[in-house]
Amino acid sequence: MAQEYGFDYELVTYKWPTWLHKQTEKQRIIWAYKILFLDVIFPISLEKVIFVDADQVVRADMGELYDMDIKGRPLAYTPFCDNNKDMDGYRFWRQGFWREHLRGRPYHIRFAITIKLYNALYVVDLVKFRETAAGDNLRDLPNYAQHTVPIFSLPQEWLWCESWCGNASKSRAKTIDLCNNPMTKEPKLQGARRIVSEWTDLDFEARKFTAKILGDELENPDPLPS
C-alpha cells in the first residue's frame, strides 16, 4: 500500500512502565498509549505529530494543520461541539465536578482513562511537550491536567462528528469522525455509509487493493450503496 500510494511508514513500540498502574482492558491500553507516552515513544528528532483516528475521513490538507500556530501550547485539540441540542443530556462536563474544575475552559475531544471518550484528531508539539515535562503531568487524566498542560483549541471544523455536532456545520468539516452515538448505538460501518458521502468509494478502493495484494476474489465486487 505504501508503494502504491507513495507514503513512508515506521513502527514504534514502548513497554508499559512498571511504575504506572497497568491497564488490563485492551481498549484502555490503546487509549493510554495515544497520550501518556508521547514524550518517550517517538524519536527525539521528531518535532511534531498529528494523530488521526482510523475511522476518520479527511477532507482537507493536513499540512494546514501541521503549520498552524498553536501559540506555544504542547497540545492542540478540538473542543466538543455544542450545537446538537439533542445531546445536551450527555454533556457531563457542563455540570458538577467537571464544570467546577474546568472553570470556563472547553472540554476537548480527547480521552480519560476512566471515561469512555475518544480523541480522534490532535496535534502534539513534541519540542514543547518535552521542554515542559508535559508527559509527567499527563499520567493523570488529560482534561483534569489541562491546568498544568495547557491545550490549544483547534478550530471546530477540524473535527466534526454527527453525535455532537449539528448538521448545519457539516459542510465546513475538514475531517469527519465516526464517533459512537450513545442515543442510537448505530454500528460504525452502517453510520459511515449514511454520514460520509465518499466513504463507500474509499472503502471499495481499499477492499479492492487488499484483495489484489492477497490474491483473493473481492467478496462484493461493487461499492456498497450509501
Image (tube, helix red, strand yellow):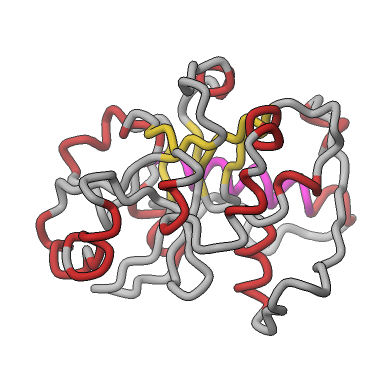
At x 14%, y 62%, the residue is 88
In the rendered structure, the answer to whether residue 164 lies left or right of residue 26 reads: left
Q: Is residue 121 left or right of residue 13?
A: left
Q: Residue at x 79, y 54 (%)?
A: 211
Q: Closer to the camera, 184 or 67?
A: 67
Q: Nearer the viewer, residue 206 or 32?
A: 32
Most frequent secondary structure within the magenta stretch = helix
Rendered view: 170 above or below 164: above
Coordinates of residue 203 in the picture (x, y in percent): 58, 48
* Residue at horizontal 25 percent and vertical 54 percent from the top: 164
Name the side, left or right, on which 71 lies relative to 103: right
Residue 44 found in image quarter: top right
Residue 54 magenta-drawn? no
Q: Is residue 35 above or below residue 155?
A: below
What residue range appears in magenta? Answer: 197-210
Q: Nearer the viewer, residue 150 or 7?
A: 150
Residue 159 in percent (x, y) is at: 39, 40
- Determine the image quadrant of residue 47: top right
Taking the spot 57% from the left edge, 49% from the top edge, the residue there is: 53
187 up-or-down from 148: above or below:
below
- Label count reads 0
Q: Pick out the residue farthest to the bottom.
A: 24
Instruction: Give how far across and how far down residue 69 sits, in percent.
Output: 49, 16
Tell me, yes or no, whether the highlighted magenta stretch contains residue 207.
yes
Out of 15 and 215, give the one closest to the viewer.
15
Image quarter hosting the N terminus: top right
